[in-house]
Amino acid sequence: MTPTKQRRRTLLRHPLSIYSTPNFPGKCCTNNGRNFQLASHEMCSACQKPVYQMEKITADKYIFHKTCFCCKKCKKKLSMYSFAPLNGEFYCIFHYQQLFKEKGNYDEGFGHTQHKTRWTLRNGAIGVPDESEA
């Protein structure tokens, strides 16, 4: 019997298991004695589906797919250099500026109450100080 045929017979009698190794039964892969573990999947903030490293964009501590990272108004795809965040929402530069121009400030332009109305005065009143008090 030739050595090649003998090796084939040995392999047929003792097939290799992809699920275990001699030193680590039940473990698939090891790296210098450490078990291999798959990376945990991070979820896209827009579609709530897993995001893999190659398609991941992180903006303002939110994680997105490259295709899910888009303007709230026009749905235009955003890049890391062409977006403006506000309260967890992302806009293209054009729409961010347009909303500012509509009301003259970012609070009213984005549907929030003006921050001036939330000030507390020294006398306990809430609002903008009168010119007579200045």
Image (cartoon, rainbow, N blue to C red):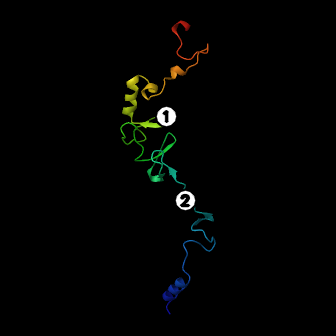
Up-down relation of residue 40 to residue 75 (above or below):
below
**Secondary structure state at the residue bearing disc 1:** loop
Question: Which image quarter: residue 80?
Answer: top left
- Residue type pointed to by label 2: Leu
**Vertical relation: 20 (above or below) 44:** below
Judged left or right of residue 10, residue 111 is: left
Q: Is residue 55 above or below residue 1?
A: above
Residue 2 image point, x, y percent = 49, 91
Residue 98 versus residue 21 in the image, above or below? above
Question: Label 1 amino acid?
Answer: Asn
Q: Earlier in the sequence, mark 2 or mark 1?
A: 2
Q: Position of residue 110 (x, y in %)?
A: 44, 29
Residue topped by disc 2: 38
**Residue occupying the point 55% across, 59% down:** 38
Q: Which residue is mark 1?
A: 87
Q: Quadrant of the C terminus?
A: top right
- Residues 64 and 4: in front is 64
* Residue at the image point whose x is 52% and y is 84% from the top: 12
